[in-house]
Amino acid sequence: MRNPIYVALDVPTVEKASELVAVLAPVVAGFKVGKELFVSAGPQLVRQIRESGASVFLDLKFHDIPNTVAKSVAAATRLDVQMLTIHTCGGLEMMRAAEAAAQETAGSLHRAAPVVLGVTVLTSMSTPELNQVGVTGDIGHQVERLAMLGNQAGLRGFVCSPLELAMLRQILPEATQLVTPGIRGPGDAAGDQKRTLSAPEAIEAGATWLVIGRPIYAAADPKAAAERILAAIASATTTA
């Protein structure tokens, strides 16, 4: 079974992140580096993770004019990340520029291009919150609209809530990679995630990768927690 787990390194210091990487690299597919950690630790931490053999999901959610986003994606590609995020609400031309930058930069380096993941609606948002910022309709409709626009732009993957997986699998090409945060177990607090599923449920619904944070990094034994989740996925896959 392919290991689908990316651990969200949502920790404030490079020391804590490095400790988690050392412990977890043998049992997970990779690590998500977000804004807090990247601002604190910078590119060197990404290089350190890559040296461990693990993949990196750089989650900085680029959203700017097309030229600026293209240059940012090119820089991330040179850093040798495997996935990165942009906001789909940046528009068609911005998304096209991001994907082109990933492909062209990777080609010049003779390596595989990172998957540029479109972020549609943040998993912390509810429909009333979406309406507050001027978007009418419900979350599902907005996710579908932005995902189809991203597909038109050539994006090969998206970040989505577990509850939108089944819908997106019906409308997007089969090869599209779907990355799902908000994974929680029966005893885990939802935190700021509004739309959650368990790891086996998310895989069953069509997730390619699972981004799991607090249930692993905040556990008393992070490695054991990751192994339990992986075993649960394997068990569900075997009995499905």
Image (cartoon, rainbow, N blue to C red):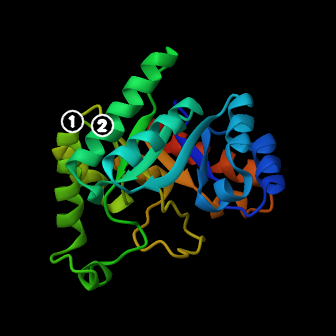
* x and y, in percent, of residue 20 in the image: 77, 49
Q: Which mark is residue 176?
A: 2
Residue 128, compared with residue 85, is above or below; it is below
Q: Nearer the viewer, residue 35 or 55?
A: 35
Residue 230, compared with residue 215, is above or below; it is above
Q: Is residue 9 visible?
A: no
**For residue 198, side relative to residue 88 (left or right):** right
* x and y, in percent, of residue 239 in the image: 44, 40
Q: Which mark is residue 173?
A: 1
* x and y, in percent, of residue 206 in the image: 34, 45
User: Is the Cβ of the residue at disc 1 closer than 8 Å to that at disc 2?
Assistant: yes
- Amino acid under disc 2: Thr
Q: Is residue 221 visible?
A: yes
**For residue 169, side relative to residue 12 (left or right):** left
Q: Residue at x 39, y 69 (%)?
A: 195
Q: Residue at x 73, y 43 (%)?
A: 45
Q: At numbered mark 1, what does the secondary structure look like: helix, strand or loop?
A: loop
**For residue 238, side relative to residue 28 (left or right):** left
* Quarter residue 64 falls in: bottom left
Q: Nearer the viewer, residue 159 or 170?
A: 159
Q: Residue at x 32, y 32 (%)?
A: 100
